[in-house]
Amino acid sequence: SSRTTPRSGYGAFKPSTVAKPPKPTTPMWMYWFLAIPSIFDLTATALCMMGLQYVNVSIYQLLRGSGIIFVVLLKQYWLFHPLYKFQWVGVVYNVVSVCLVASTAVLSNSDENSKVSQAQAACGVLLILAGALVQAMQFVFEEKIMNLEESAAPPLLLIGMEGFWGTLLCLVVVYPLSAALPGDDWNGAYEDP
């Protein structure tokens, strides 16, 4: 017959004896280290929400697009991931767009009937841009953590720990702080949880 069955010995089918490399374990310090992206995220959210008080929501959303610019710059000069020329063309388009949107936000508040002054609108734009910069720092930091050679954090662990630390920081730091600050909310607090 044309079919041959391997005999024991040479040519026999054997289960693979090649040892699979063990899955790398995440060191304990990495779980603590993953609090840093949560701090970036909370800071970015706080800056953007402060800026949102002085600009329209549509302006806010368009200014958040500046995060692309900041991510590209950080990846280029911190992670040393060079971009192609056509990608730089896209970044230039984003810069022009952000400048147009920011100037629209500031100049649209020049009339006397506006509730927000030009200075407040400019402050709002700067706060949102600062929030986008901090968010970009978070993204680049996360990419760096996921690519560490000796102790890379898997993406699901990174996201899960970011949620864990974000929740913990909100409960232990943000809510008590906002309840202690004076404001217009219930019981005279800035924000009463």
Image (cartoon, grey):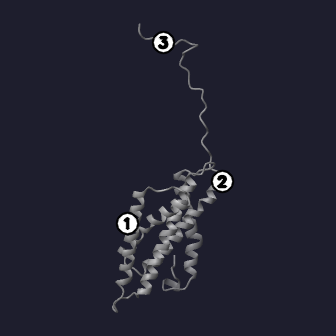
> In the rendered image, which quarter is residue 167 located in?
bottom right
Q: Nearer the viewer, residue 125 or 5?
A: 125
Which amino acid lies under the numbered mark 3 shown in the image of this protein?
Thr
- Residue at the disc numbered 2: 28
Which amino acid lies under the numbered mark 1 shown in the image of this protein?
Tyr
x and y percent of residue 54 in the render? 42, 82
- Does the residue at mark 2 contact the one at mark 1 (Cβ under 8 Å)? no
Mark 2 closeness class: few <14, some 14–19, many ≥20 residues within 10 Å: few
Which amino acid lies under the numbered mark 2 shown in the image of this protein?
Met
- Residue at the disc numbered 3: 5
x and y percent of residue 122 in the render? 44, 82
Residue appearing at x 39%, y 62% in the figure: 89
- Lateral position of residue 154 relative to residue 87, left or right: right
- Residue at the disc numbered 1: 93
Q: Which quadrant, please, contains the N terminus?
A: top left
When the figure is inspected, residue 107 is found, relative to residue 154, above or below; the finding is below
When the figure is inspected, residue 193 is found, relative to residue 31, above or below; the finding is below
Residue appearing at x 37%, y 78% in the figure: 56
Q: Residue furthest front?
A: 85
In the rendered image, is residue 163 in sight? no
Mark 1 closeness class: few <14, some 14–19, many ≥20 residues within 10 Å: few
Per the model, the C-alpha gap separating discs 3 and 1 is 66 Å
Front of the two marks 3 and 1: 1
Label 3: state its secondary structure.
loop
In the rendered image, is residue 166 in sight? yes
**Which of marks 1 and 3 precedes in the sequence?**
3
Label 2: state its secondary structure.
helix
x and y percent of residue 9 in the render? 58, 13
Q: Nearer the viewer, residue 152 or 70?
A: 70
Label 1: state its secondary structure.
helix
When the figure is inspected, residue 193 is found, relative to residue 163, above or below; the finding is below
